[in-house]
Image: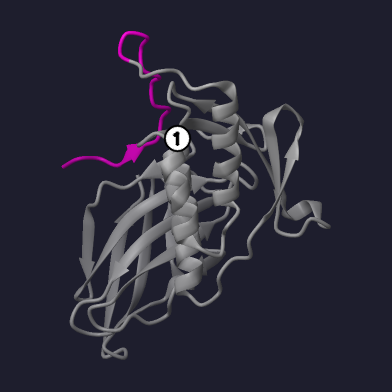
Amino acid sequence: MPGVATATQSPVPTASSAPPSATAADAATSARDLVDALAKKSDPDAIREGLKLTTADSVAYIYVQHQANMAEAALDGGSPFVDDDVSELPAGEYKVCEDPSNEETCGVFGGFKSDATGKIVDLTVNDKALKGRLTVGNGQTVKAGGGKFTFLTAYKAASSENLFVTVKMEAGSKMLSPFLYDAAYRSPDGKQRKATYANGPSDLDPESNSVGSFVFQSMKPGGRVTLEGCVDECANDFKAVIKVG
């Protein structure tokens, strides 16, 4: 059974196989456009436009995927995120703030690395590398309550060191009601902790799907999420154990 992949930086093509090199200006434009896409947190589709600016399966690509998944969970749950304000800093860095008057809501994107075509392969958040902080699923599903659950992405946040996990949830022929805030995470060392925050719908109509997100404070990646809930207006219960990586 294939494992869950952890994001690493994609290699830059060799000189013999690389397409014509992009200019520094092209790379800088891609970086700004990528930050602008990431700042549109109220719209997961707008964030995913940033995927076109990154190299497939690179650290940058998976980071954009994860941020879009987080935004989709918030939107699906009826509480969409607020877009960030973007300002340019020296040395090719960008400051993003939910509230520019409150520094605690701000972060800094920098350290952009691009391939020979100008597409972004890597970046830093608050001067911290993303390598080793991102995990992406392989499409493997867990069946429970007549529905399916698929691990999408996880991110050990550079700003808080909390673990953010996103999961696709699909109902079968009956309503599925996940107890999102009761989700628990067990790390590889056996430590178990309940979610401190979650996003997504509390009910999924039959044959419907959505994205759920969970935040586990100061937890290590590589564990599993246990999500419980009920089926068919709580006529029955379900329990899904989802491998995070």
Question: Farthest residue in the top direction?
Answer: 16
Q: Quadrant of the N terminus?
A: top left
Q: Nearer the viewer, residue 80 or 166?
A: 80
Q: Is residue 243 left or right of residue 32?
A: left
Of all residues, the one furthest to the left in this rendering is 1
Q: Which residues are magenta?
A: 1-17
Residue neighbourhood size for the residue with mark 1, other residues' Cα within 10 Å, grouped as few (<14), some (14–19), many (≥20): many
Instruction: Tell me which amino acid carries mark 1.
Output: Val
Q: Position of residue 157 (x, y in %)?
A: 57, 45
The picture places residue 70, in percent across and down from the top left corner, at 48, 59
Q: Which residue is mark 1?
A: 59
Say which residue appears at 38% left-offset and 21% top-offset: 11
Which quadrant would residue 100 be assigned to in this image?
A: bottom right
- 159 or 113, nearer to the observer: 113
Q: Quadrant of the C terminus?
A: top left
Q: How is the image coloured?
A: one colour
> Relative to 38, does residue 215 appear above or below in the rendering?
below
Q: Where's residue 145, x and y in %?
A: 23, 76
Q: Please name the predominant secondary structure of the magenta segment in the image.
A: loop
Q: Check if residue 75 falls in the magenta segment.
A: no
Q: Is residue 189 visible?
A: no
Position of residue 216 relative to residue 201, above or below, is: above
Secondary element at tag 1: helix
Asked whether the viewer can see residue 54, the reply is yes
Residue 9 is a magenta residue: yes
- Give the residue at x 57% y 43%: 33
Residue 42: x, y in percent?
56, 65
The residue lying toward the viewer, choosing from 176 and 235, is 176
Residue at coordinates 83% horizontally, 57% vertically from top-left?
101
Q: Is residue 182 above or below residue 11?
A: below
Q: Examine the image and state in which quarter residue 34 appears.
A: top right
